[in-house]
Image (cartoon, grey):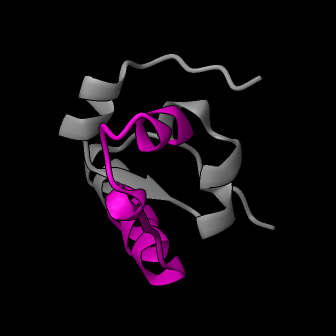
Amino acid sequence: MLARELDGETIRRARVVVDQPGTVEGAGDIVIPIEDGTIPRGHAVGSFALEDLVAARLAYTRAQARGIGREVRL
């Protein structure tokens, strides 16, 4: 049984981005509105590693500018 935290209308109005297309299959928040016709299957879009990298770089740059956070050497 699939569970969800958000109603279909909220999902319809949202921009849904998933890491991988297969992620959608187990997500009740997305699957249930697809099954009841609230959203089309293509409503959830995939995320690319490049977008993740750009977002991480932006967060890092902003933290540096504000003098917050901690740098960890790996």
Q: Position of residue 11 (x, y in %)?
A: 32, 34
Name the chief secondary structure element in magenta. helix
Depicted 38 relative to depicted 8: above or below: below
Q: Is residue 28 left or right of residue 16?
A: right
Q: Give above or below for 61 relative to 35.
A: below
Taking depth in this image into account, of 13 and 36 the one nearest to the observer is 36
Verify whether residue 43 appears in magenta. Answer: yes
Position of residue 38 in the picture relative to residue 31 (left or right): left
Which range is magenta?
Answer: 31-60
Image coords of residue 16 (percent x, y)? 36, 50
Image location (x, y in percent) of residue 64: 36, 55
* Foreground pick, 31 / 5: 31
Question: Is residue 20 something one can see in this rendering?
Answer: no
Residue at image coords 37%, 65%: 42
In this view of the protein, which residue sits in the foreground, 23 or 49? 23
28 lies above or below 37: above
In the image, is residue 57 part of the stretch drawn in magenta? yes
Q: Quadrant of residue 73?
A: bottom right
